[in-house]
Image (cartoon, coloured by chain):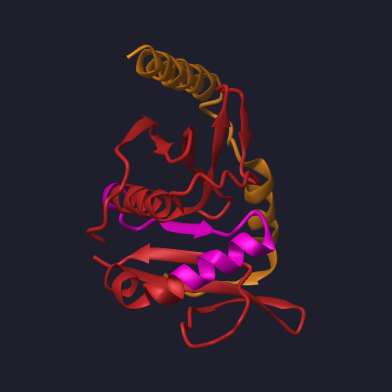
Chain colours: A red, B orange
Amino acid sequence: MHRAHYPFTRIHATRYSFISEGKTPIVKIVEFSSSWKEGLYNLGFGDSKDGIILNDYAESNNGDIAKVLVTVIKIIMVFTEEFPTATIAFTGSTKQRTLLYNRILKKYYKLFSQQFTITGLVEAGGAVLEVAFDPTSSQEYLFYFVNRIN
Amino acid sequence: MRKIKKLNKTLLDSINNTIVVTKTTANKTLFPEKLQKLNELLKRAKLMNR
């Protein structure tokens, strides 16, 4: 991933921030939170406004979505370089955003799959299964998982 | 020049506020809803072996 990204800062072990410099400057936070399953982290991502309210539903429309997402991917790469066995789980805060992530994973699948194994959680007959991400399918995923390939 | 100074101050204030908040919430997730959703799904999910 050689596209331009914003410089970011590690605030503490599992939390990073950067400034989206689109139409207006917006502080973004990326956080990896431990789930109850060891080694599996939820990726939280949202806007920090006035340093107090963190909103991951925000549609900031700051005109720099590509650069913001490249920055988030870069942060995932840095985090998983340090914790190579970590599994990072993510989903959108809204259905629209999950679909956006799906489109991005499909579009850049060749590139991503060189560095990450990508899987997803799907509903199947009342059960929840982890399956390989299929870029050619229209399958809806509840969560996406990425694992660094060493 | 004044506009740039004002912008820089706003950015600095924002970063400082964020650092204060994130320090005080260092042990808590900032995105509890998604984490809860993930944990609930994991309870009934059949995961691949890693």
* Location of residue A52 in the rendering, given as x and y in whole percent from the top left corner: 61, 23
**Which range is magenta?**
A81-104
**Which residue is located at x 59 percent, y 84 percent?**
A138
* Location of residue A87 in the rendering, given as x and y in whole percent from the top left corner: 43, 59
In front: A111, or B32?
A: A111
Visible in this render: residue A131?
Answer: yes
**Which residue is located at x 51 percent, y 58 percent?**
A89
Visible in this render: residue A39?
Answer: no
**Which residue is located at x 42 percent, y 49 percent?**
A68
Quarter of the figure with the N terminus of chain A: bottom left
Q: Is residue A103 depicted above or below A46 in this figure?
A: below
* Location of residue B27 in the rendering, given as x and y in whole percent from the top left corner: 54, 29
Q: Is residue A40 depicted above or below A118 in this figure?
A: above
In front: B7, or A7?
A: B7
* Location of residue B6 in the rendering, given as x and y in whole percent from the top left corner: 42, 14
In front: A6, or A82?
A: A6
Instruction: Look at the image and say whether residue B41 sits in the magenta stretch.
Output: no
Q: Is residue A6 left or right of residue B11?
A: left
